[in-house]
Image (cartoon, rainbow, N blue to C red):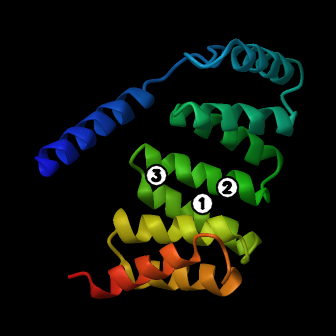
Amino acid sequence: MKRIIVVAMLLVMAAGCQQKEQPRPQSQVPAGGDMHTQEEMRMLQEAVKKDPGNVNAWIKIGNTMMDTSRFGEAIEAYQKALQLDAKNVDVRVDLGTCYRNIGKPDEAVKEYRKALEINPGHLNGHKNLGVVLAYDLRDRAAAIKEFEKYLELAPSSPDAAAVKQEIQNLRTAK
């Protein structure tokens, strides 16, 4: 029964990812959500129409799209933000996460590595890279290195025990 539930969840997630890649007009606001979010998106879209160089507005659009699981649109917004500020590590990490969510783990790894070149101490960059390496690309040795680097940088982080357990699981996996 548990296996059926897991398979059903994976199918639902896969169907959702296929929908997320559908191109949508940029002017569309996120479906659902509260009226505040929709109004904020309208304002942000107006801001970038008036000033396409408004990096903060592009980042906020990307964040809103990512938070509403519209990863393709988040990618577009983050790419525009990075054209304006190529060294924004947080945007690069978020872009990598969006790539992973649309089934492009190799692109995710590229973005995480670019972020870590700029800031080798970026915790989420190491942790997210470890996740993609472990579960999408099945490179356990490289994943362990990233998780160990995360723990080296943040040994008392709230999730340190979970990361240590994950390293142990990867070491004993067959």
Residue to which mark 2 is pinned: 92
Q: Mark 3 is on which residue type? A: Arg
Q: Quick one: label 2, few (<14), some, or many (20+) residues within 10 Å?
A: many
Q: Is residue 146 left or right of residue 137?
A: right
Residue 114 seen by the camera: no
Toward which corner of the image does residue 27 lie, by quadrant? top right
The residue lying toward the viewer, choosing from 11 and 74, is 11
Q: Residue 100, labelled with which disc? A: 3
Give the Cα separation between the discs numbered 1 and 3: 10 Å
Q: Residue 125, labelled with which disc? A: none
Toward which corner of the image does residue 32 lie, by quadrant? top right
Between discs 2 and 1, the one toward the N terminus? 2
Residue 133 image offset from top left, x and y in percent: 42, 70
Residue 135 image offset from top left, x and y in percent: 35, 65
Nearest-to-viewer mark from 1 and 3: 3
Q: Is residue 73 left or right of residue 27?
A: left
Q: Residue at x 45, y 83 (%)?
A: 144
Q: Quick one: label 3, few (<14), some, or many (20+) residues within 10 Å?
A: many
Q: Quick one: label 1, few (<14), some, or many (20+) residues within 10 Å?
A: many
Give the Cα separation between the discs numbered 2 and 1: 6 Å
Residue to which mark 1 is pinned: 111
Instruction: Give the answer, above or below, for where 87 lies relative to 34.
Output: below
